[in-house]
Image (cartoon, grey):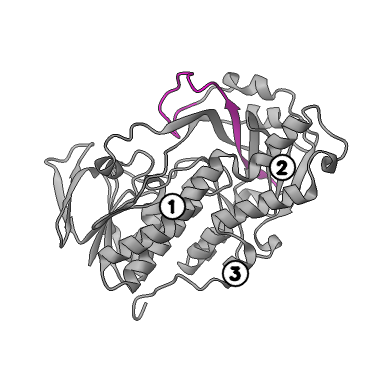
Amino acid sequence: MHVIIVGGGICGLSTALSLHRAGIACTVYEAVPELRALGVGINLLPHAVRELVELGLGEALAAVAIPTAELIYANRHGQRIWQEPRGLDAGYNWPQYSIARGDLQMILLDAVRARLGPDAIRTGHAFTQLTQTDSGVTATFTHPAGGGADTQVEGDLLVAADGIHSTVRRQFYPDEGDPIWNGCVLWRATTEGPPFLTGRSMVMAGHANQKFVCYPVSRALHDTGRSLVNWIAEIRYPTDTPWPREDWNRPGKVESFLPAFQDWDFGWLNVPDIIRQAPAIYEFPMVDRDPVPTWCFGRVILAGDAAHPMYPIGSNGASQSIIDARVLAFHLATAGDPVDAFRRFDAERRPPATAIVLANRGNGPEQVMQLVEERAPDGFSDIHTVISATELEETSSRYKMTAGFVPDALNNRPSLDVRRQGG
């Protein structure tokens, strides 16, 4: 069996490593001419870190990522609403990691090349269309950077890991249209500076219409007593405001949003200073897509952001893509029929991923910040006169259950690892 993987991002590379570990041949086709370390920071939740550790990437992650110690929600005045331990400090058997997206991409890329060989990733191949029969799939790729005629590739199966603008998904949902913007714009960057709080803290401050998120992402800098802070400044606008197509690499202008955060100096965190000291800022409108009735189309399956693009709330986007990869490989390795394996994957993964997409539209666990803003916009002297400890705990627990990272359940779940004979 040979699997065509369309897309060389986190989902595509994780899928390649997972399939290889299970003894299933695959090749990754990526549109860009060169895979480079792009993007800012992301969080990997313990259920995703478990899968990467079981893929043999634990040491590589630990060498560059920050093991997140705590998560803090605060209002726009810097008053703490909720605080909880994370990762190993919360009783998981695996850490939660804050990491530069480019570092994660390179860890996955290096592992794919080392294990599958340099020809396992074909860059400069932009997917255009596919056909399938009862026995296989033929994918057609163009070469945006030049290189002659289109290339047709035959395989037994095709995994679409080509992101929120998936060309494969468009073939099956041609009338879907553009991603849906919720009115929020994110400005993202990294800033070097002194550590804040524990030096491994993740902070979310504000409310649904204005928010600041930050956490350190560089283990190397952390070990020198400094911090590389990944941050996101978010402002909500009317949804009829015109905004360019989302692109992680579009430069943003500090004057577009800094005035809204000018007074956000909490003492323990100086938001305007962090913003001003960033060497480069990127702008991104927050978008997702409506859930679809199936990801499975015979010998073709959608995965990652091609299947379930979601708002970056609850630190779940990359984590869910990694879990997709592992569950997909598990079913292909354990089901007798590959088409049936795709059906099983769809039945197992689509309902919970849909639930996360919808939960994130309701602000997920960050809903407590909005409730506090509505109930006490000028601040509070005692948070429990505004929102009860029970309501705070239930909000956090409910999202963990939806997203699949309740500590005991994760720690005791059987492994998804399926290793090829002799592997």
Q: Position of residue 167 (x, y in %)?
A: 28, 41
Depth check, front residue: 176 or 68: 176
Quarter of the image with the C terminus is bottom left
Query: Which one is earlier in the sequence, the residue at label 3 or at label 2?
Result: 2
Q: Secondary structure at mark 2?
A: strand
To which quarter of the image does residue 117 belong?
bottom left
Asked whether residue 228 appears in the rendered view, the answer is no
Residue at which label 2 appears:
73
From which residue to which does the magenta span run?
A: 224-251
Q: Looking at the image, do the residues carrying marks 1 and 3 touch, with CB atoms under 8 Å apart?
A: no
> For residue 230: magenta?
yes
Q: Position of residue 393 (x, y in %)?
A: 72, 52
Residue extending farthest to the front is 293
Which residue is at a point 51% across and 73% down the rendered structure image? 414
Question: Type of residue at label 3?
Answer: Asn
Which residue is at a point 43% across and 32% down the rendered structure image? 180
Q: Secondary structure at mark 1?
A: helix
Q: Is residue 167 left or right of residue 142?
A: right
Q: Looking at the image, do the residues carrying marks 1 and 2 touch, with CB atoms under 8 Å apart?
A: no
Question: Type of residue at label 2?
Answer: Tyr
Query: Which label belongs to residue 106?
Result: 1
Depth check, front residue: 232 or 79: 79
At label 3, counting other C-alpha atoms closer than 10 Å, the crowd grade (few under 14, some 14-19, many 20 or more) is some
